[in-house]
Amino acid sequence: MNNTALICGISGQDGSWLAQLLLKKGYEVWGTSRDAQGNGFTNLVRLRICDRVKLLSMVPEDFRSVFMAIKKSKPSEVYFLAGQSSVGLSFEQPAETMQSISLGTLNILEACRMVDFPVKLYHAGSSECFGDTGGMAANEKTHFHPRSPYAVAKASAFWLVDNYREAYGLFTCSGILFNHESPLRPERFVTQKIISTVRRIANGSNEKLQLGRLDIARDWGWAPEYVEAMWLMLQQDIPDDYVIATGQTNTLESFVSAAFASYNLDWREYVEQNPEYFRPTDLLISRADTGKAKAKLGWHACLGLNEVIAGMICEDLRGSAL
């Protein structure tokens, strides 16, 4: 078997953890970035695997760029994790978000269809596609109601993957992942912003943690566990889509409280709500039904909110959860 994987967007949190996992499994790993020569691949360096990965430049919106990356790497598995990844930023850059995600997914599908060797494709879906389910747990049959440009783009990409699977018989899967964190998260994500700010305050900073709504509730998991689910999807006999989450929902206030409590601090003394961080639309409760992943993939999350926070605080990059 040709154990070669191409990870599109390898410099991000998920791409880096996935690269580590696949290297451990004996894969030859290729990875793409928009500018491989100019990208420092900080996450790969932190995981001490940068010199073990073959790197390529690829622009998802440019079909020729995508096709050449697949043709050169000749992968048996492609993991499409590229594209603008911030819900908040998608309101400021809707066109770039739509193009990088929707057009990027279309190009990768077309390239996989046109090459003369079989390719299995994993597409990074998102729980944001579900929108507000009224507190009901979302599963693979729950209707989409996206409420941000990012979610609209991810929903469009999901249906492209579904269409190519049906129309051309491609082995394509979408992982509908709920929130998942690790020390590799950039600080533009609220969880890493919280952890970094709490750490500075504990070390003597006089700053306040500026946040938007604290009553939103999310399902937060540990990213190194979630990349295992991505890999498992491509090892099945029949391609399918799966919701990946812990099945536990907590409020952002609970996340903040636990993070400060890790340093024996009372969060109420250090947090200020700032209207600047309120989004035009936001989901109140995100809840997941993970039954299908457990039954068919044999996968379930082992780490919950407190373990995720502890892992982010101690910055353990050994990938022990794998």
Image (tube, rainbow, N blue to C red):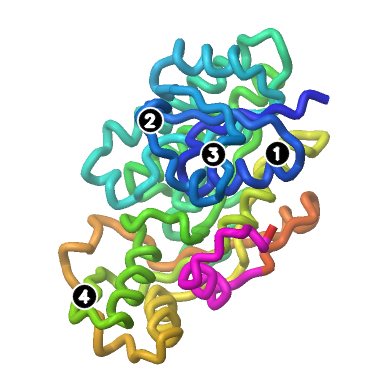
Q: CA distance from mark 1 to mark 3?
A: 31 Å
Name the residue carrying label 2. Answer: 100
* Front: mark 4 or 3: 3
Is 262 a magenta residue?
no
Q: Give above or below for 151 relative to 317.
A: above
Give the residue type that dot 4 points to.
Gln
List the residue tagged with mark 1.
Answer: 240
Q: Nearer the viewer, residue 207 or 47?
A: 47
Determine whether 121 is above or below 49 in the image: above
Q: Position of residue 240 (x, y in %)?
A: 70, 38
Residue type (three-letter) at the residue carrying disc 3? Cys
Q: Residue at x 57, y 74 (%)?
A: 307
Tell me which numbered mark, 2 or 1, is placed earlier along the sequence.
2
Viewer-side residue, 70 vs 177: 70
Q: Quadrant of the N terminus?
A: top right
CA separation in Å, label 2 and label 1: 23 Å
The residues colored magenta run 303-321
Residue type, label 1: Asp
- Tell me which numbered mark, 1 or 3, is placed earlier along the sequence: 3
The tag earlier along the polypeptide, 4 or 1, is 1
Would you name the residue on which mark 4 appears?
273
Look at mark 3 in the image and give the residue it sits on.
Answer: 50
